[in-house]
Amino acid sequence: MSGRRLRDRRFLLVLLILAVLCSAGIALYLNERNTRQQTRELSLPSTGDWVELDVTSQDIDAAGGEMTLYVVPVPHGTLAQDPDSGTFTRRVDITVRATTRTELRADPGEAATPKPVSANLYDGTPTDYPFDRYRFEVLFSAADATGAVPVGVVFGDADPFFVVRPTGTPYGAEGTVFEGRVSRARSTFILAWFMIAAMWALALAVLAGAEVLYRGRQGMVWPSLGWMAATLFALIGMRNAAPGTPPIGSLIDYVAFFWAEGIIAACLVVTVVSGSRVEHRRRVDADGPTAGAGP
């Protein structure tokens, strides 16, 4: 009876651990979702007439060193026909200085539509995955027929693989400097660490299995060899499925992937060579008495 109670307690402990892990996962998800849905107001002007630029980051390409920003101009004060329409009363030209100089135009009587703008990523390298970080800088300015128009930035983060931490600094009467830091999202970190742990766990499992076969002189155990070969190629698919498609030669490769593939390949070769020798000796021992017998 005591043994049954002990098993029941262990079962309840396992269920409790699973419940805690699932709850922690849900809490992390909700925290990241709520953080991403928040918008940040950066360097909003205090004057009545100004242009709000709703900026959203999407399609961050770390390998290409480029980030795509979608910009929507929104008028305020006398620039807007009414507070909620988003329609300009007069023409406003918006200049974006980033990777290239881009001109956006808001015509009177029309509501502006999202326009893509490319920003250069610098001060980082994609081979540091998943710890790579980058910086960017964009200058926004606006002007109408009377001169410069103050600019404010409202930022939203929409790329699921990266987190953007922006800042906005007024740039005199010409506009606003929009800059910040880009790093991998929390979910990418968690999955990358899981992949590193899984690669090492599978490699050590294959090593343990190969050691049992080698010391036991069990010959060619085909199911075990098939499992080792399948693990060797399965790790390639796992590595290629890493979020953000890191280039070959990244930190994750030198920390786990290259070593795991080398260990598994070596174990497979050693097991095959050892097993073939054992099978050969068994064949010789089995054929020896028959070959040595005479009439």
Image (cartoon, grey):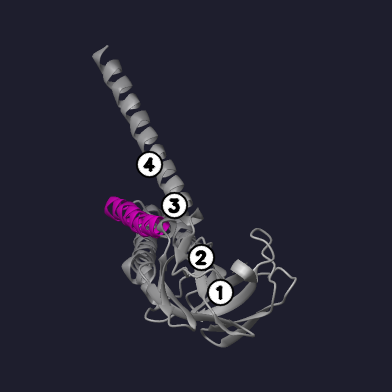
| Count of numbered circles in the view | 4
Q: Return the residue nearer the eye: 218 or 255.
A: 255
Residue occupied by mark 1: 68
Q: Compare marks 2 and 3 and give the one earlier in the sequence.
A: 3
Residue occupied by mark 2: 154
Determine which of the numbered discs, if any, sits on residue 24 in the image. Answer: 4
Which residue: 64% across, 74% down? Answer: 115
Residue 68 in which image quadrant: bottom right
Q: Compare marks 1 and 2 and give the one earlier in the sequence.
A: 1
Q: Residue 119: image x %, image y %?
A: 51, 79
Disc 3 to disc 1, C-alpha distance: 21 Å
Image quarter hosting the C terminus: bottom left
Q: Residue 150: image x %, image y %?
A: 52, 76
Disc 1 to disc 2, C-alpha distance: 16 Å
Mark 2 residue element: strand
What amino acid is labelled 3 in the image? Glu
Q: Compare marks 3 and 1 and give the one earlier in the sequence.
A: 3
Mark 4 residue element: helix
